[in-house]
Amino acid sequence: MNGTAMNGTAVGDDVKRPAMLASVRELSVRFASPQGAVHAVNGVSFDLAAGEVLGLIGESGSGKSVTLRALMRLLPESRTRIDGSIIVGGRNVMSLSRGLLNEYRGGTTAMIFQDPSLALDPVYTIGQQIAEAIRQHLDVSRSEARARALEALEMVRIPSARERLDSYPHEMSGGMRQRAMIALALAMKPRLILADEPTTALDATVQIQVLLLLRELQQQMGTSAIFVTHDLGVAAEICDRIAVMYAGRIVETGTATEVLRSPRHPYTQALMASTIHGSMRGQRIEGLAGSPPDLARLPAGCAFRARCTRAQAGCADAVPELLPHAGHAVACHVAQATQPLRAVPA
Amino acid sequence: MSAVMQEAAPQGAAAMVEVEGLRKQFRVRGAGFGAPAKVVHAVSGVSFSLQAGQTLGIVGESGCGKSTLARLLMGLIPADDGRVSIAGANLSQDAASLKALRRRMQMVFQDSFASLNPRLTIEDAIMFGPRVHGVPPDEARARCHRLLERVGLDPARFAGRYPHEVSGGQRQRVNIARALALQPQVVLFDESVSALDKSVEIQVLNLLRDLKEEFGLTYLFISHDLNVVQYISDVVMVMYLGKVVEIGPAEVLYERPAHPYTRALLASMPSMDPQRRTLQAPISGDPPSPIDPPSGCRFRTRCPHAAPVCGEREPALVDAQSGGARAACHLLDTASGHPLAGKELS
Ligand SMILES: Nc1ncnc2c1ncn2[C@@H]1O[C@H](COP(=O)(O)OP(=O)(O)O)[C@@H](O)[C@H]1O
Ligand SMILES: Nc1ncnc2c1ncn2[C@@H]1O[C@H](COP(=O)(O)OP(=O)(O)O)[C@@H](O)[C@H]1O
Ligand SMILES: [Mg+2]
Ligand SMILES: [Mg+2]
């Protein structure tokens, strides 16, 4: 039986955590396709405390972006079936009326993407776009909105911010466009930032600047964030907690330190082993063989078992529940049946 | 000098790849009507030599000229100046010598789709090169099947498929098989594993290691991923705005980077440990445009140690104290006139 949904708290929660800003329960998302229903998200539950950053990590296709888009109510309604509940700031996101939805998107919640062109319109200047967004959410004059847009650009440390107000997105470098998109997202002081691989396309020296900027602003403003990344190093820099996704389910969750230093799920362990480190020079790397299952034909039991080196007969019987195990939560029959290993030194 | 690079014989007899003073500029339209054309300084005097059987890793941020260098080495675009020799033969732009070059050197691109003709089956794509070079059909097909097997794709299942019928990782294996079909001595990889999931990336990197041993190949490996480059390379070359700023044995360069840019690049790598997060970005801003690059040292506008001399004279590659590495920085040359030259930097 699923204790998770019954008592109304997600497992792996620390009693010390402050009030919850967001609660997701048994979220599932299915897309209609010619091959049958694509089970993109399959019963995801988590809580997000105020001011907390939750990282969603996992290989491509594991359902990270779909989870974020569900939280933003951005999924195409016609071909999509969404079940479960999403509460943000005390409001039921799934049943927001059109008017409240407009306030929710961009006001309560803001999204930042890997590709700034998804958020920035090429035919308007940066200043126009930020000011317009502000006026959609706040009853302020044009000049007041422009002043706030300038503040937003200064906040993300765009050099010569005043001139940049009148720049078009294509006139800026990649790093500056990314900063402008962050300014646009944060101008309304949202309570929740949904970030989908926001630094993945940036070069190393620029990525770390944008990452530290995001971390600093998020801490300053006390904003919560869900941060999707496939890069464990990036997750280590910014996330308080981490949820590892596989085939649309959370398979392990805990504090960033717990998950990255003492991963318990064989999938998380394999992900860590697959993260190349210069120190592995000359060695053959035993990574993860095979590929994730077809989401239109999910196998019975644990979805990871076909690739799992520790799989046993019982793994095919039931989907493992996400249960607390030595400090954090794991969804693995084998890990749950064995003593936790000693923490691996980082 | 013209695109023909014929004279001078290679000095080091055993060098498999020898490059001297390679230059390439692109003329681009200025912004606005009647604006004068601008010049992109994409590759500005690159020299290096690579011994047979070694792997040279080439790193640097986007726009620093890595792909342009790759296309110059492959003879896909003519150089403005400089000399390239591969396996003892000088590269020139006439058709016969380019065809001969293809036998010695092949390339694998990042985009596994773009380099495969969508209307050719995998078998036809791999056989194409050998057929053009006069290999009889039966032999070409046998070679193709051997290679498919070698890269981990069962010929019975994959030979007849089209590029869109296989996954990204499988397509990149096809590209590798195709590159090897002409039995080259040198293979150039331009971000060939960058688009792959970590677990697939490792499978491909393991394959590249094995193939190198088996066929005695020499690799040029371009990547923005510093961990992957450290893992696979014997020698690493760091580029910044069209120039080589540092080159040396991988272990020396990663242990004791001599150039301030190399240091910044390495310090920008996320920590992987939530308890030891990066506190400050090593350098600020984005790389400047290769149109009108800074005078003197091109890195000086972002360098924490820049002095007047850095804007006046271009630093040459000199031996760095760290043994075996060479770097282009006035700090390393006690006669340069830089006030901190020769001093230990923190
Ligand atoms: N609009 C859609 N229609 C059908 N399938 C979709 C749609 N959006 C995403 N998917 C599928 O859902 C799965 C999860 O995707 P996604 O959440 O984007 O993965 P990721 O973890 O890489 O962000 C993938 O198999 C993807 O192909
Ligand atoms: N065909 C071209 N025409 C004009 N500019 C080009 C062309 N190819 C490359 N460039 C420019 O040359 C510079 C170096 O590009 P590239 O070699 O692709 O860098 P990298 O591969 O390191 O990212 C960039 O500024 C790029 O815009
Ligand atoms: Mg995604
Ligand atoms: Mg490139």
Image (cartoon, coloured by chain):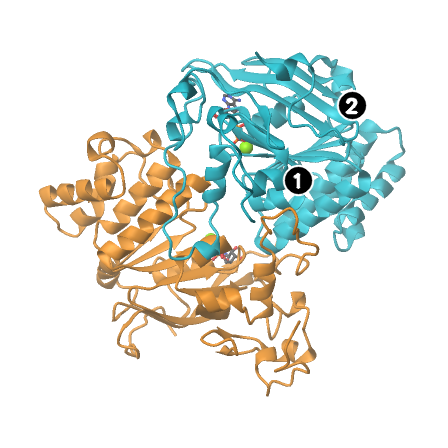
Question: Which label's residue is closer to the chain start, 1 or 2?
Answer: 2
Q: Position of residue B133 (x, y in %)?
A: 17, 52
Question: In the displayed structure, would residue A78 be above or below residue A259?
Answer: above
Q: Which residue is mark 1?
A: A239
| Image position of B232 (left or right of A268) | left
| Image position of A9 (left or right of B64) | right
Chain ID of residue with mark 2: A
Is residue B289 visible to the viewer in this orientation of the structure?
no
| Image position of B223 (left or right of B215) | right
| Image position of B27 (left or right of A115) | left
Chain B colour as displayed: orange
Residue A89 shows which numbered tag? 2
> Which residue is pictured at 31% across the width and 47% down the height?
B207
Q: Amino acid at mark 2?
A: Gly
Question: In the displayed structure, would residue A317 be above or below residue A19?
Answer: above
Name the foreground residue: B29 vs A292.
Answer: A292
Secondary structure category for the residue under label 2: loop
Chain A colour as displayed: cyan
Circle nearer the viewer, 1 or 2: 1
Q: Amino acid at mark 1?
A: Cys
- On whether ligand 1 comes within 8 Å of the CB at mark 1, the answer is no
Q: Quadrant of the N terminus of chain A?
A: top right
> Which residue is pictured at 47% across the width and 14% down the height?
A37
Q: Position of residue A96 (x, y in %)?
A: 74, 15
Residue A124 shows which numbered tag? none
